[in-house]
């Protein structure tokens, strides 16, 4: 994967000697990142680090995986994608008996100590010298000693202490955040809310989601099942979980009975969408690969973000928002800290269910942007620029 963008000015981010970097993945292994299409920020960061001229050797560290689960997957599951090992890039794959992290602080400290010992051995075998640590795993960013390595930076995409699936680990995260502050460690968050949940005492920055320009410069042709839907085609892409407010979706579909509302993505909570399955102009579609996704988004008329307002959604920098704009769409969204300022002239904000349809109507009236505006947005929001800023923080002494 490459990022085909215009070269950055030579002096924009500095020209210091390359630095060895260790990236500790959060909760998804390299193979898992490949299977989900390398869409998450840490996935993109892992790929980008392997080609950055500011980076020497790169060690990508999987989260712990269960030995038993790996054996079962080897027999019954999809085959893991081979890691593209090179002279300057390797993958560290730690294994243990248990599948999940422990939920107690003491047990987590011991697990992190064992994990760090393995990382250190792998780094020494690789010949790394005082590598900088970037951790997307909050306990490792707080409990890891890393006195043998360089600066430590926590890279957080959400407020983990407000993420419902991670509730049992919330107390552990709070202690890990406190340790980060005691040690003066750096932190980078996708939104001000995500960064504030850590309240770092070391170097820090808010760096939102970004784009792979290669995916968006020339989107392909959307499938006929989508292009044949009557317009306006109002589209939501992303995980179809309870963060989507179905009452907003219903109100939108009823306001546009001759148009189409499409919700597309993995649906871990299908019962949540039962109240709108009776609507003839609502389509609930499964996830598609990245090539099809860009084509479908580009063929839509309005991008939707009908999220409920929670601590978790207020800490998000929705990738879908950047993808809608990269395709040239206007966006109707709930007013959240991660949405309002990205492209104000092309964003119609709602405060809740009562005025979401009004926001959709304003977005329809805004219409698509010009091709020049679309390409400018893609260039300005490329992942390359985001990660250059991240390295500015991660390579600064804590």
Image (spheres, rainbow, N blue to C red):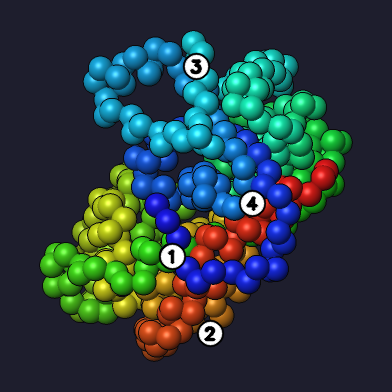
Q: Classify mark 2: helix, strand or loop.
A: helix
Q: Residue at x 50, y 30 (%)?
A: 91
348, above or below 93, in the image: below
Q: Classify mark 1: helix, strand or loop.
A: loop
Tell me if I can see residue 346 in this picture. Answer: yes
* Mark pair 4, 2: CA separation: 35 Å
Q: In the rendering, at what x and y percent does residue 58 appear?
A: 57, 38
Q: Is residue 253 left or right of residue 224?
A: right
Whichever of labels 4 and 3 marks the residue nearer the N terminus, that label is 4
Q: Is residue 109 left or right of residue 322?
A: right
Instruction: Using a 10 Å C-alpha cutoff, classify the residue at mark 2 as few (fewer than 14 neighbours), some (14 to 19) or many (20 or more).
Output: few
* Mark pair 3, 1: CA separation: 36 Å
| Residue that carries the numbered disc 4 in the rendered image | 54
Q: Residue at x 55, y 30 (%)?
A: 61
Q: In the rendering, at what x and y percent does residue 209 appear?
A: 54, 59
Q: Residue at x 47, y 68 (%)?
A: 5
Front residue of 262 and 278: 262
* Mark pair 4, 3: CA separation: 31 Å
* Mark pair 4, 1: CA separation: 18 Å
- Image disc number at residue 345: 2
Whichever of labels 4 and 2 marks the residue nearer the N terminus, that label is 4
- Image disc number at residue 84: none
Tell which tag, 3 or 1, sits nearer the viewer.
1
Whichever of labels 4 and 1 marks the residue nearer the N terminus, that label is 1
| Residue that carries the numbered disc 3 in the rendered image | 95
Front residue of 227 and 92: 92
| Residue that carries the numbered disc 1 in the rendered image | 4
Instruction: Using a 10 Å C-alpha cutoff, classify the residue at mark 1 as few (fewer than 14 neighbours), some (14 to 19) or many (20 or more).
Output: some
Tell which tag, 4 or 2, sits nearer the viewer.
4
């Amino acid at each position: 994967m490459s990022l085909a963008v215009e070269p950055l000015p030579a002096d924009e981010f500095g020209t210091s000697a390359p630095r060895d970097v260790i990236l500790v993945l959060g909760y998804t292994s390299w193979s898992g990142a490949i299977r989900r299409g390398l869409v998450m920020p840490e996935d993109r960061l892992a790929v980008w680090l392997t080609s950055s001229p500011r980076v020497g050797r790169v060690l990508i560290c999987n989260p712990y995986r269960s030995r038993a689960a790996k054996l079962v997957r080897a027999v019954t599951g999809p085959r893991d994608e081979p890691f593209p090992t090179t002279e300057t890039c390797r993958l560290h794959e730690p294994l243990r008996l248990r599948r999940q992290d422990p939920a107690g602080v003491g047990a987590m400290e011991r697990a992190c100590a064992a994990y760090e010992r393995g990382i250190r051995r792998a780094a020494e075998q690789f010949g790394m010298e005082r590598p900088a640590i970037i951790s997307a795993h909050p306990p490792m960013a707080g409990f890891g000693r890393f006195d043998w390595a360089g600066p430590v930076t926590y890279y957080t995409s959400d407020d983990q202490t407000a993420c419902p699936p991670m509730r049992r680990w919330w107390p552990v995260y709070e202690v890990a955040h406190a340790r980060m502050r005691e040690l003066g460690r750096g932190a980078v968050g996708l939104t001000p809310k995500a960064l504030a949940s850590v309240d770092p005492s070391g170097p820090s920055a808010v760096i939102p989601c970004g784009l792979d320009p290669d995916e968006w410069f020339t989107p392909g042709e959307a499938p006929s099942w989508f292009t044949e839907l009557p317009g306006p085609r109002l589209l939501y892409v992303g995980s179809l979980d309870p963060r989507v407010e179905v009452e907003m979706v219903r109100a939108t579909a009823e306001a546009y009975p001759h148009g189409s509302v499409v919700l597309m993505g993995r649906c871990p909570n299908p019962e949540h969408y039962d109240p709108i399955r009776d609507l003839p102009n609502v389509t609930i579609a499964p996830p598609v690969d990245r090539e099809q996704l860009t084509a479908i988004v580009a063929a839509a008329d309005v991008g939707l973000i009908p999220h409920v307002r929670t601590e978790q959604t207020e800490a998000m920098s929705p990738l879908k928002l950047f993808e809608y704009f990269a395709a040239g769409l206007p966006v109707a969204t709930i007013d959240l800290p991660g949405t309002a300022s990205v492209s104000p002239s092309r964003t119609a904000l709602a405060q809740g269910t009562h005025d979401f349809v009004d926001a959709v109507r304003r977005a329809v009236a805004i219409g698509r942007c010009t091709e020049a505006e679309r390409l400018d947005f893609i260039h300005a929001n490329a992942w390359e620029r985001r990660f250059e800023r991240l390295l500015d923080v991660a390579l600064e002494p804590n």
